[in-house]
Image (cartoon, rainbow, N blue to C red):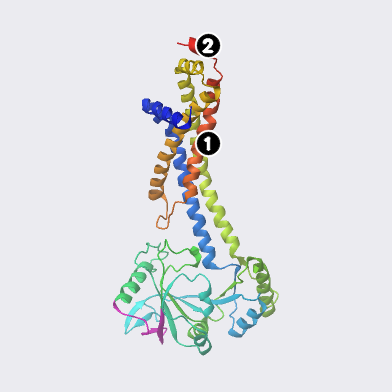
Amino acid sequence: MRLPDLMATGWAEIWAHKMRSFLSFFAIAIGIATFFYTLSVLSQSYRRIGRTAEVAGKGRVETRTNHPLTVVQYKDLKERLPAGSSLAFTSDDYNVQEGWWNSLYHKGNQLVGATVYGILPSFKESDFVYRLEGRFINWQDVENKHRVIVLTVFPREVKKSKRRFWWDDVDEHIQKVKEYSEHHHLLHQQVVLNNQTFTVVGILHLPTENEDVRLSRNREWRPTLYIPYTTWYDLYPDENDKRPVDIRVVTGKESTAHTAGGTLTSYLRSQFGPNEKPEIEFFHEKIEERLKEARKSLNNMLFMGIIAMIAGGIGIMNVTMAVIFSRTKEIGIRRALGASRKDILFQFVVEAMLLGLCGAIAGMILGYLAVLHLAEDTSQMTFSWWVVAGSILIALVTSFLFALYPAWQAAKLKPVEALKNE
């Protein structure tokens, strides 16, 4: 028989025994749903991690020192790094609590308590996921210690954050900045921080939490203010020897990351003595850890999918054997009319694979619904063609393998013996 004839016969048999067919492909559908969900989420995780690595930059290396670093030291260190490297210093945050003497004011209104960072223009060269309104801090601001400030504004869609302390009204501060900035255009306006007047030269609009691909440790979790690196030390002179400096290098090549790490270590020791022991963090190692965690968290789901597929395969095998037993006389008639063993084999294998195809379609629908309701982030979820193709292929291969043995047994039946069967 030709393949279209085999498929027509198979569909007729499936339709004639709907309940039996449903029970046969149900386990296959559960297994495929599990695979579809797992592969879709894993694919999304890989894309997100890849985007995280992309915005961070290749060959990224981070460390910190408890000693303040000057702009002169910045230039000296930059010359020692691999050619084309980006170098950024960030003074560690200084928490400005609302109601204290160093709150942020605009036109006499106490605006917000925030986190203040002193940065260099090179801050923009890695993890810059913002929409910039106005301008960013430049080298002229740094060299002249300009009193300029860049504000961050959170999007409307912001999740409630956990309250670490009873006075830490993070969500209230976030909401206050959003509402105030919507009613008062703060760009180019003057604000007061630590009793000193600053000009708002830029506003950074943060992406939504789902769109923000940075690692959680690199995100802003409360209103944040960025001022020139040198201005920060002028603004908080008592903090010069208390706050560490974060150092970030992006070489542009993963192959030069370890060279940059060695340069950082040797330079900091040359500046602050042999007891300086900086902890060098390589960003690609963090990415590998994220990938490992993603695979590990989904391994259990894959295992459950494999178990369901095996159960479905066994169900198809049992049903195929029962069908063969009930149609033994039909097999004998077909053999007597000239059907070959290959025809008999193909007939039952095709019927089983059709059941597998039905299970794959039902399973993908279930898996799609599971993704929509169970996945943490569905806003950027896409369904790759290879996930669909892989799900169908797994179902077809499982059905084929488990139907092969009973189909082969049917093909081996002798026509005379089959015709005697009642």
Residue 304 visible here = no
Sequence-first disc among 2 and 1: 1
Residue, x 33% and y 79% (percent of image)? Answer: 110
User: Which contiguous range is marked in magenta?
Assistant: 183-202
Q: Quadrant of the C terminus?
A: top left
Q: Nearer the viewer, residue 73 or 235?
A: 73
* Number of the label disc, if any, that sits on residue 397: 1
Instruction: Using the image, tell me which numbered label, if any, was put on residue 416.
Output: 2
Q: CA distance from mark 2 to mark 1?
A: 33 Å
Q: Residue at x 38, y 50 (%)?
A: 372
Does the magenta run of residues contain 341?
A: no
The residue sitting at 63% across, 66% down in the picture is: 254
Toward the bottom, the furthest residue is 144
Residue 133 point in image, percent of width and height: 40, 77
Tell me which residue sits at (69%, 74%) in the image: 266
Helix, strand or loop at disc 2? helix
Q: Is 55 placed above or below 1 here?
A: below
Answer whether residue 326 is visible to the viewer in this image. yes
Q: Quick one: label 2, few (<14), some, or many (20+) residues within 10 Å?
A: few
Q: Are marks 2 and 1 in contact (CB under 8 Å)?
A: no
| Amino acid on which the number 2 mark rests in the picture | Val
418 in relation to 146, above or below:
above
Residue 405: x and y in percent read 55, 25
| Helix, strand or loop for disc 1 | helix
Residue 83's x, y, as percent? 65, 76
